[in-house]
Image (cartoon, rainbow, N blue to C red):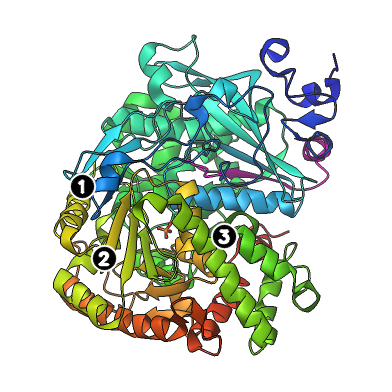
Amino acid sequence: MSNPSELLKYARIKDFEASYSQDIRDDVYFGLPVKPILEAESRLLSSQEKVLAYFSMEYGLATSVYNIFKSVQPVKPANQVSENEIFSNERIPDYLFSLKLETVLDLPIYSGGLGVLAGDTIKTAADMKMPLVAVGILWNKGYFKQRFWFKYGQLPEEMKWDPSSFPGLIPLENKVKLDLKDRNIYLRLWKYYVYSQYHDSVVPLILLDSNVKENDEATRRLTDRLYKSDDLDGRLLQRVILGMGGVLALDELKYPVSIHHLNEGHAAFAFVQKARKVKPKERESLKDHFAYTCHTPVPAGHDRFNFSDLERVLKPSDLEIVKNFGTEDEEAGIVNLTLLAMNTSRSVNAVSQKHGEVMRFQFSSYREKIKAVTNGIHFPTWVSEPILKFLEAYGSTLGDFRNDPTLLKNVLLLKDDQGFRRNLWSAHQESKKKLCQHLSRWELKENVLTVAWARRIAAYKRPSLIFQDIDRLMDMARRIGPLQILYAGKAHPNDSLAFTYINDIMNAIDRTTEQSGLVKILMLENYDIYIAKMLVSGVDIWLNNPLPPYEASGTSGMKAIANAVLQLSTLDGWVVEAADKPIGQFFGYEDDAKTFADGLVLRLDEDSKALYGALEEMMRLYYQTNKNGEPDVQSAWLDKMVYCLSEAGYFNTFRMVQEYKKSVWDY
Ligand SMILES: *Cc1c(COP(=O)(O)O)cnc(C)c1O
């Protein structure tokens, strides 16, 4: 038997012989090369470069669609993408069939956009061979599994998966002890190596896990479920584990970290752990080692805790530090983790230019300090195979866009090339055909205009906007041409308002069963990265209708433009920065970033009217362009597709990480 002794120096794997020796050999790590691991680890440990530690509560690594690890054993059913129901206005196929997707699960430690961004960022760091180590939590029960309950909405189900046999994930011998007021929390460490697109580099992701025998029952369950919010101490302890436990884990593994990058206030306790070891006077200079990114203007995204709740958990000396840097309201005795993070970080940033303005308004005394770095997506993860192949054929004009996606702006050089336009149309139709095949039981048609709305179900995202006036929608389809509308999204189990939106959508679907030949509507269960990739690459129009200014950035539309899919969007988040380019249609209420109200006024009536107007224009153009499978490649629709691709040259994580290097991490 081979002996991967070098790798085991860097990762002391628990139960190596019994459980991992077939998948990890001298030169192979779950089907990928070992060498980049050895190189990355030795670089990280040598401390010749500034090591960056990236903290996030969640990571969406897209393991179902990108860099899939191979295991000698077949993947266990628990670690496979599940079969999903569909609720549609076709009815009979819903009853007879489900959507079967046979691939390994996305490592289920994410819930949505924040996690996908964190995953895309560290994949990009691997592509750029950066000295980065990522820190997160091993969620033993993931987020949750969404089940539909006929037409009565969402039924959250506990998610089960098996970390000990998940390809690429390894348990370490290392444990750390987090000493709090009246208890110790023991955390086991796991490692997951995130590979670059060419498998020539990795970044390690360290995952913390409280499910060990040294802890009592309640403590073991702290790392069960992401964003479990029904118990206050649990919520607080999850944050303490990520921040303080994360720093302990980096010390235990001997990574000489110089910059801690905190995503959301979730990770703000990292500073507290560092501050424990220095005298109060020296704490100011600790800030040079911290950077903080805020990802949402929505109040629920900013954690607040009472002094008395913190007191139950934290040692008095730790509480002092937290109060000192994080107090929002002395009299009411409230700490805000956003303030804690802002006050202890040298760099503070928002995630789009618009969000920068909003954040400067929300936190006006910090306005000088607040920068903005617009989000991106990892192009190799999100581009479909047909579009990638198509682009590669034009490599001599575009340049090496796989290494540097900013070169995608060069597609504009080919805008008037008839062959290029025809091939772009064909590549898109191929991706669309794959989507239709997945949903073949519902008889989706390749030459029918297809629109998707897929994202987290939250009030400000206005999930049911397009269903405000079903009659008008049907009338448009009758006059101009048929529509296919695909829906997907989970509502947080404690968000009772969001539940009602799922019911609204299902009711709308239910009311149109007679008219599915005109407008076919499908709601897919259990939105995840696999479904997201299928949708962003396979539809014709990506619908995005948040109420400004609540969408800090949004990234799913960026995934769509990377696949030449047009935008139908309100002006919020990243879209504001692309709105002067012909990448689709924009509509609806525009805010001035100075009227941030506490209560949501959703403007459903006027904005749905604006939406129908914009959609009608797009429908006309589409059916002028696609005449039953015969494309008119001169059409302005093709111009828009080309502009989408060229904008993908900007809205990607390659450009984003370069900006972070320059203005946040100061390399
Ligand atoms: C990209 C993505 C999101 C985020 O989409 P937004 O447009 O930012 O809301 C959420 N969930 C999944 C599964 C994604 O892939």
Distance (Cα) linking label 3 and label 2: 35 Å
| Mark 1 Cα shell of 10 Å, populated few (<14), some (14-19), many (≥20) | many
Is ligand 1 closer than 8 angstroms to the Cβ of mark 2? no
Q: Are marks 1 and 2 in contact (CB under 8 Å)?
A: no
Element type at mark 2: loop
Distance (Cα) linking label 1 and label 3: 29 Å
Q: Residue 83: x percent and y percent?
A: 40, 37
Q: Residue at x 32, y 25 (%)?
A: 312
Q: Residue at x 17, y 68 (%)?
A: 468
Of labels 1 and 3, earlier in sequence is 3
| Mark 2 Cα shell of 10 Å, populated few (<14), some (14-19), many (≥20) | some
Q: Residue 366: x percent and y percent?
A: 44, 64
Is ligand 1 closer than 8 angstroms to the Cβ of mark 3? yes
Residue span colored magenta: 39-61
Q: Residue at x 62, y 41 (%)?
A: 134
Q: 304 and 114: which one is in front? A: 114
Q: Residue 459: x percent and y percent?
A: 24, 57
Kind of residue indicated by mark 2 = Gly
Total marks placed: 3
Residue identifier under label 2: 517
Q: Are marks 3 and 2 in contact (CB under 8 Å)?
A: no
Residue identifier under label 3: 377
Q: Residue 444: x percent and y percent?
A: 38, 60
Element type at mark 1: helix
Kind of residue indicated by mark 3 = Ile
